Amino acid sequence: MSQERVCVCYFYIRRFWFHEHSYTFTLSHIHTHTHSLSLSLLLSLSLSLSGPFNSWDRVVYVYDDDDGNNGTVIKKNDTISFNWILANYHSSEAVDNDDGSCFYDTHDNVFIHEMLDGRAFGSLKSDFGGHSNYHHNNLDLFFADGFSLQDEKPHAQLPGFEDGYYENYLYMTTDGEYGFGNATVYSNTIWSPTGNVTEGGKPLAEFQKEDPKHNDPCTVASAYPDDKVVLDLARKILGMA
């Protein structure tokens, strides 16, 4: 399946975002406790390694939550949903959750990634203390892997604050490892050239067999499907079907 083939999908969308210099849309220095980016088309001609969407965790903020708790710093989820996002020209990710970004609920999007100098990057990103980023029910096209987490000390995620990668459709550029790091992972559909997908350095089925309850249950891998399968799925996610 070619990237050009995917990009001929036509659909109605509320907003169009385009930027020719760096990232298209960014959240940083956030003082409020929830945001939403939905029903948009984002693309970028980025001269940096950011994605069309880029977030940073920079400022400690305090607010009173809806339950009457005064002075909490645990923010509600920011939501990225029902978008078509093109990670084109020098984009490292479609959603670049950078530098400690946390509490993002990213679901029901179609992400198309263009390789940078022949190299593909991952879909879910989490680094420098990032946590609680949930990537689910998305169609991730032309990525090297589904999730890439910097979870070694001192950046390890605390129990209950793990990132999540689940119920996604991932179209990998090559066979091999489809994720890195200790995210909550399950029920993904992985497509690669031959279906030879690994996790934890082992064939997927072998990795799952070692601990069926915790080691990525219900995830399946297979060779690339027909183009129509992928295009129909993209239309369904974006409400075109």
Image: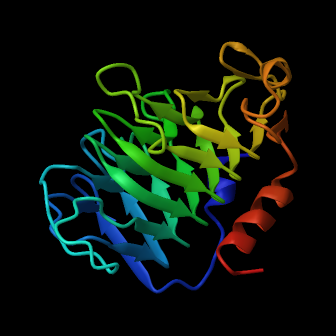
- At x 74%, y 73%, the residue is 236
Q: Is residue 89 visible?
A: no
Compared to residue 53, the image places residue 200 above or below, namely above
Compared to residue 19, the image places residue 167 above or below, namely above
Q: Nearer the viewer, residue 3 or 25?
A: 25
Percent coordinates x, y for residue 5 in the rendering: 69, 56
Compared to residue 65, the image places residue 198 above or below, namely above
Percent coordinates x, y for residue 211 in the rendering: 78, 24
Q: Nearer the viewer, residue 129 or 168?
A: 129
Percent coordinates x, y for residue 58 in the rendering: 14, 49
Tell me if 138 is positioned left or right of 73 in this view.
Answer: right
What scheme was used to colour the molecule? rainbow
Tell me if 37 is positioned left or right of 162 in this view.
Answer: left
- At x 84%, y 17%, the residue is 206
Q: Nearer the viewer, residue 130 or 80?
A: 130
Tell me if 125 is positioned left or right of 82 in this view.
Answer: left
